[in-house]
Image (cartoon, helix red, strand yellow):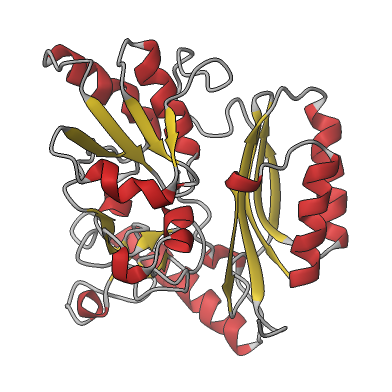
Amino acid sequence: MNKNFFKVAAFYAFADLSDLDKLQKTFLDFLKKEHIKGTVLLAHEGVNGTLAGTEAGIDKFKSFLKLNHLYESQNFKISYCEEDPFPRLKVKLKDEIVSIGNELADPATIVGEYVQPEDWNNLISQDDVLVLDTRNTYEFSIGTFAKSIQPETTNFREFPDWLEGLESSDIDKNKKVAMFCTGGIRCEKASSLMKAKGFKNIYHLQGGILNYMEKVPEEDSLWQGECFVFDDRVALNHNLEAGSYDMCHGCRMPITDADKLKEEYERGVSCPNCFYEKTPEQKKRYADRQKQVDLAKLRKEKHIGASYQSIKK
């Protein structure tokens, strides 16, 4: 791997954590020392994050997680990119490391059955299996598995309401459900909630789409499209490389080159998804921001306002 590439680690671990203020400082001190940027979420239930740094820096971070008993190899995924995908470092204290807002979802107590990437194709190809994409609509729109359904959520906290509606439809709770998400963590909560509500046969893809792309050759893949990620790369192809999508800074939706040719598109301001929803005041504010981004680029600096990290997972 070219030494100038950035190594990106997406990771999570459920663990019973205490003294979060102290742990937050420990993370910050270590990551600053290694010049690693990105976002880490800490809660009493564990840790979740995506970080980027040098090859050596991320390797040291893996050792740091092991030392703090927060490393799980199946939930630690690596990819690479040519430019740093994060403008700054954030270590945040949260109520949950992935927010579902329902206390019945407790992965420490109960979860679905893990399915390895090598066995996933066989499972989702069965006629009696409901394939469930637990990600948000804008993620689903650029790539998913064949014959999957998506709950039409724009935020993961909407999943319990969707599930309540599914229950009211008198669905057979013995039906096989195979769920997946980007790195596996949302399925931990979603499968736990479904099991708590009496669904019997819940399966989820171990390590998520990222693990599947790493382990399953593209010629054997049932994945269609690209995988949305919450950083400046926007999406990854099956080789875990930056894909073909850009992102509208006005609405944070992924956009194509064809979208950029439409009259509703203005760089940094709007796209066909949001042009008619933005007020003139908003458009002016976004245009002013884009001007600052361009000026920062001329100075060979990265304008923090250009970050995609305000997207709600």
* Depicted 22 relative to depicted 74: above or below: above
Q: Quadrant of the C terminus?
A: top left
* Depicted 164 relative to depicted 276: above or below: above
Residue drawn 61% across the image and 41% down it: 12
* Depicted 74 relative to depicted 195: above or below: below
* Foreground pick, 124 / 40: 124
- The spot of residue 237 in percent (x, y) is 39, 70
* Depicted 151 relative to depicted 254: above or below: above
Image quadrant in which you'd find residue 166? top left
- The spot of residue 151 in percent (x, y) is 23, 35
Residue lying farthest to the bottom in this orientation = 298
Residue drawn 54% across the image and 75% down it: 292
Q: Quadrant of the N terminus?
A: bottom right
Res 3 seen here: yes
Left/right of residue 228 with respect to residue 43 in the rendered view: left
* Foreground pick, 52 / 206: 206
Left/right of residue 52 with respect to residue 193 in the rendered view: right
Res 279 seen here: no
- The spot of residue 280 in percent (x, y) is 28, 61
Image quadrant in which you'd find residue 148? top left
- The spot of residue 61 in percent (x, y) is 78, 55
Left/right of residue 244 with respect to residue 275 in the rendered view: right
* Foreground pick, 17 / 246: 17
Image quadrant in which you'd find residue 298? bottom right
Question: How many tags in the picture?
Answer: 0
Residue drawn 58% across the image and 33% down it: 97
